[in-house]
């Protein structure tokens, strides 16, 4: 667990957080922890990694006007029905 001490807050700041904590039915510490966690900065992603991920995702995506026949055949052969989940029913052709 990490800890931090914050000094030199403006007058009334802690009083406002105490009131908010009381209204939420929790301690001042829990209130401040929640504020810190909700406002945690998002780490910056490496541009090269994002570009590579984008290229891989684009390669997996059917292009507009593309032929979906191969994809549909693969899903059918894998046993997926119209709902996108495997179809466990027996094949009618085998009876």
Image (spheres, helix red, strand yellow):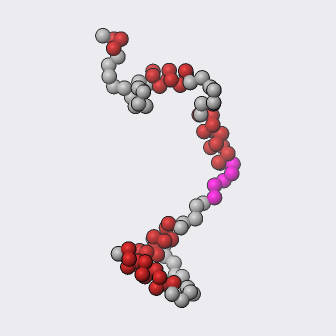
Quarter the N terminus occupies: bottom left
Q: Residue at x 60, y 60 (%)?
A: 43
Q: Residue at x 50, y 66 (%)?
A: 38
The image shows residue 86, relative to residue 31, as above or below, that is above
Picture coordinates of residue 86, whole percent (x, y): 39, 28
Answer with the quarter of the image where residue 76 lies.
Answer: top left
Quarter the C terminus occupies: top left
Q: Residue at x 56, y 86 (%)?
A: 10
Front-lying residue, 47 or 69: 69
Range of magenta residues: 44-49
Evaluate whether residue 27 shows in this view: no
Q: Residue at x 51, y 87 (%)?
A: 12
Picture coordinates of residue 94, whole percent (x, y): 33, 11
Left or right, 44 with reference to 73? right
Evaluate whether residue 43 shows in this view: yes
Front-lying residue, 14 or 57: 14
Q: Is residue 53 located in the magenta-colored stretch of the structure? A: no
Picture coordinates of residue 27, whole percent (x, y): 38, 78
The image shows residue 21, relative to residue 57, as above or below, that is below
């Amino acid at each position: 667990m990490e800890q931090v001490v914050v000094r030199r807050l403006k007058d009334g700041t802690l009083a406002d957080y105490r009131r908010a904590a009381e209204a939420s039915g929790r301690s001042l510490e829990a209130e401040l922890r929640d504020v810190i966690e909700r406002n945690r900065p998002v780490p910056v992603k490496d541009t090269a990694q994002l570009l590579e991920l984008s290229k891989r995702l684009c390669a997996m995506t059917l292009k507009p006007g593309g032929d979906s026949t191969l994809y549909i055949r693969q899903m059918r052969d894998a046993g997926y029905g119209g709902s996108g989940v495997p179809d466990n029913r027996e094949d009618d052709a085998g009876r």
